[in-house]
Each structure stands twice: as C-alpha cells, then as structure tokens.
Amino acid sequence: GAVVSQHPSWVICKSGTSVKIECRSLDFQATTMFWYRQFPKQSLMLMATSNEGSKATYEQGVEKDKFLINHASLTLSTLTVTSAHPEDSSFYICSASKASGGAGDTGELFFGEGSRLTVL
Amino acid sequence: SQKIEQNSEALNIQEGKTATLTCNYTNYSPAYLQWYRQDPGRGPVFLLLIRENEKEKRKERLKVTFDTTLKQSLFHITASQPADSATYLCALENGGFKTIFGAGTRLFVKA
C-alpha cells in the first residue's frame, strides 16, 4: 500500500502566529504532493501543487505568501499558515501521487488524515 | 464555467439495496475520473478510477460507469451495508495529475 502521514492532526493557535503542517509519504517517493482545504460539508478545494525541488504552483485566489509550501524531499512537503487569522480555521489535507509521468501512471491520490486548524 | 455536480442531498437506502450516486461535470475533458470515500474528520480514500475510453469498471460490490458524451459518471454500491455509510466524492483529472473534487454525496445505509 501507500501511506501518507500528516501531522499534527489538530492544532489550536492564537491569531497572528504561524502554524506548520507536515505531510510525509511513508513507503513511497512522491514527486508531487497536493494541498487541499475543506470547509464543513463542502468539497476539497485545491490550494497548491507541490513539486519536489521547485516552487509550488498555487491555485487562483490562494495567497502564496500566506500559505508557504516547501517540498524539500521526495517524502516530505510542509504547509505553513503564516500570521493565521480565525478565517484560516479549516481542515487541511495533503495528498501524494506516485505518478512519474510514465504510461502506466494512474491519477490515484493517497491522502493524509488531515489537520484541523483552529485559530482563536 | 467549470463545474462538478453531485447530489447535494443525502441518499438514504435500506441495507441490501443498491445505492446509485451521480456525478455530472461541465467544461472539463478529463482523461480519467475517480471516486473516493470520505468518513467524517478523515482524509479521502481512493476507491476506483475509470479512464475516458472505458465505459464501466467494477471492484467487488462497486461499479462505476463513465459517459463522456453525457459528461456523467454513475457510482453503484450493490448489496449495501451500514458500513458503506460515508460521503462519496467524485474527482476529475484536470491536467498534470491535478485532481478537482465534487462536493460529495452523503450516503446513509439503514440496517
């Protein structure tokens, strides 16, 4: 199987502080990782695509200076919510793809368990 | 504009019946479509992938159809069980392995 570990699973912080969330692929190398945000009873909203060794690609409307993404190795991507505000409170989920661009690749994504952020 | 639409209302069915969930999309041309299961407070779990040149895909009690003309996918769970109760998400490939999700349909299976 393919396991993606996300940490922390929940975090409470004060307004104005920064919070880092880690996403690790435990038993495979993930060239590409994706970060999603989910509000209650709503869809997963893609925030950014994270590629190892290069800058993340952000979706329209997502502030790159607010949500810093670092993909320093093939097994780790981090999302840092800077100067958090109550409206940043949400469920953040990462996913990883095994795809390497070959003909046999599928689009199956392996998701972490999510991190619930509450900003007071 | 691009849209992925799933039944927003919850689907309630009796144990043993077949559950059918619908996913319609607009202004996408996905190379493949996926279905995921999500339980409350958890990350989604991959169930099935169907490519644009495939009409139907099966896995145990699950069946997915994909009609690129109608721009629709149907997801069936046969002989449903209470343990199948969850939210089911439709997801489309949108270039470069980028995956876009629908809002999901909540399924409740009553014993």
Image (tube, coloured by chain):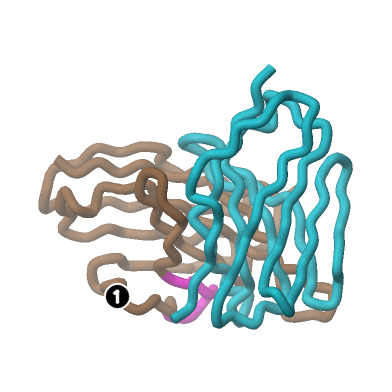
Rendered view: B13 above or below A32: above
Q: Please state the total of marks drawn on the protein image.
A: 1
> Is disc 1 placed on a helix, strand or loop?
loop
Left or right, B50 with respect to B39, comes to: right
Rendering coords of residue A41 (x, y %): 41, 45
Q: Which residue is disc 1 drawn over? A: A61
Rendered view: B59 above or below B24: above
Give the chain of mark 1: A
Left or right, B36 with respect to A90, comes to: right
The disc labelled 1 sits on which kind of residue?
Gly
Q: Residue at x 68, y 24 (%)?
A: B82
Regarding residue A100, the answer to whether it shows in the image is no
Q: Residue at x 58, y 71 (%)?
A: B25
Rendering quarter of residue A35: bottom left
Rendering coords of residue A18 (x, y %): 21, 54
Residue A106 lies in the magenta stretch: no
Q: Quadrant of the C terminus of chain A?
A: top left
Rendering quarter of residue B19: top right
Q: Residue at x 40, y 52 (%)?
A: A38
Rendering coords of residue A11 (x, y %): 30, 38
Identify the hue of chain A: brown
Rendering coords of residue B44 (x, y %): 58, 47
Toward the viewer: A92 or A22?
A: A92
Identify the hue of chain B: cyan
Rendering quarter of residue A100: bottom right
- The stretch in magenta equals A48-55
